[in-house]
Amino acid sequence: MQGSNNPAKNLFVLSLTLIVMIVGLGFGTSLFLYSYKLLNSSALSNKNLQTRSLKIGILGNQENYLPLADYLKKQFGGKLEVVVDGYEKLSYQEAKARIATKQWDIAFTLSPMVSVAAKDNGYFFATRMFPRNPPYYQSAIFVRANSPIKSIEDLTPNTTIALGDFNSASSFYMPVYDLFGKTLNVKMGLRGQQIREMVQSGEVDIGAGAFGDTVTKDPNIRIIHQSRNIPGSGVYLSPNLSQSDREAIRQVLLDAPAELQKKANFGKGKEPDYSFFLGISRRTEQVLSCSDFTKNPVNFFCADNNSKRQTAMTKNTSIVGRVNGWSRPDDSTIRLNLSSNSGKLYSVVVTSDILNQIPNVGNTLSLQNKMIEINSVYPKKINNKLELVITEPNQLRLFE
């Protein structure tokens, strides 16, 4: 009993007790944090998404995206169905149609034109494509190395140019913008490799494509013009996915192994700014609203419009007609001239973002001379013209 009153001994016991408690508390805290981190990591890597299937939309080689599909299955559980949809020769217009109908859950847009379509359809930016490349690139107009053409000033109405699809930024929009005022023979709807081969073989005089991709350092070709900056493309997630699913998918994509990201051409990066590029592309459309790409030579400027009005048919309560010219009063609004078999002429007013949400439309250039149907829109008489204002994507349909 006398020992229990020993101050030194009591102090030693108290100190030892405190040390044990501190060590125990530290161990317990570390164990808790480790367990929490482990569980959290496990929850992320084996999270059960609300969706039971994911469709990866691509415009490239499927072999490059199959490892990504396997990776997503492992991260989110084996019961998740992951499908890769698309291929190298899938047209931009078809890609935009699949985005407009929300067929793709994860869209690898490849082109800024398809990126804009994804944004217009409510898709959410996840990460950049081609993150190792600069955020902006250029279009180049090129000739074969021994061509007498030295610059775009040498182009004449006898010159033949190879262009890409209407929806291609680098092989259509930017070169057409830079060739304003010219009259040329045009072969279009071509992929980058085709354009390069046609220039090298002499089948065409000049071609256009992305600098660093279609146009590379090649002794057989020579660049005669380089465009302004074009923003890159991104990976976008469907608005049909829940917010929690989108956040989980985005994080898993960002955490993917480097080799997998390299193979599928994506990685960390900010969303490009498309505002300046949109101004160029829509001004290009405005200039081309009076150009006819169905016959050569093509004027890359507005001339007198001598095209004949086309007749159309009416169907039930809808208005069916043929697009016979169009204009763009401002950067966001498009006016389509529509003629019907009753002899009535309509002005169809639609915005670019709504047009991007309509399957198979592509863009205004591809609407020329096409039959369309307008539903649930009542014409209003404005300045002696019948005007149809489209406010929903389902009010306009393109006939195949």
Image (spheres, helix red, strand yellow):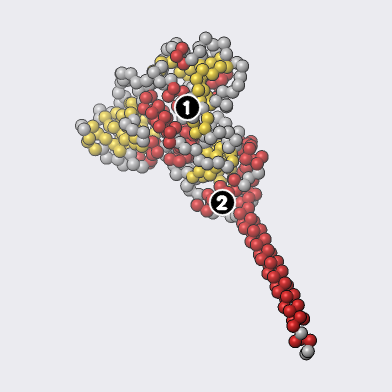
Out of 240 and 172, give the one closest to the viewer: 172
Out of 365 and 250, give the one closest to the viewer: 250
Mark 1: few, some, or many residues within 10 Å (few <14, many ≥20)? Answer: some
The label nearer to you, 2 versus 1, is 1
Q: Which residue is mark 1?
A: 228
Distance (Cα) linking label 2 and label 1: 36 Å
Instruction: Name the image quarter holding residue 122.
Output: top left
Q: Amino acid at mark 2?
A: Ala
Residue at 65% over, 44% down:
257
- SS category of the residue bearing label 1: loop
Mark 2: few, some, or many residues within 10 Å (few <14, many ≥20)? Answer: some
Q: Is residue 284 left or right of residue 39?
A: left
Q: Earlier in the sequence, mark 2 or mark 1?
A: 1
Residue 98 in view in this figure: no
Q: Which mark is residue 312?
A: none
Figure check: 285 above or below 265: above
Which quarter of the rendered picture does the N terminus lie within? bottom right
Residue 178 location (% of width, % of height): 44, 22
Residue 181 location (% of width, % of height): 39, 18
Q: Amino acid at mark 1?
A: Arg
Q: Which residue is mark 2?
A: 248
Residue at 50% over, 43% down:
125
Out of 281 and 69, give the one closest to the viewer: 281
Q: Residue furthest top?
A: 148
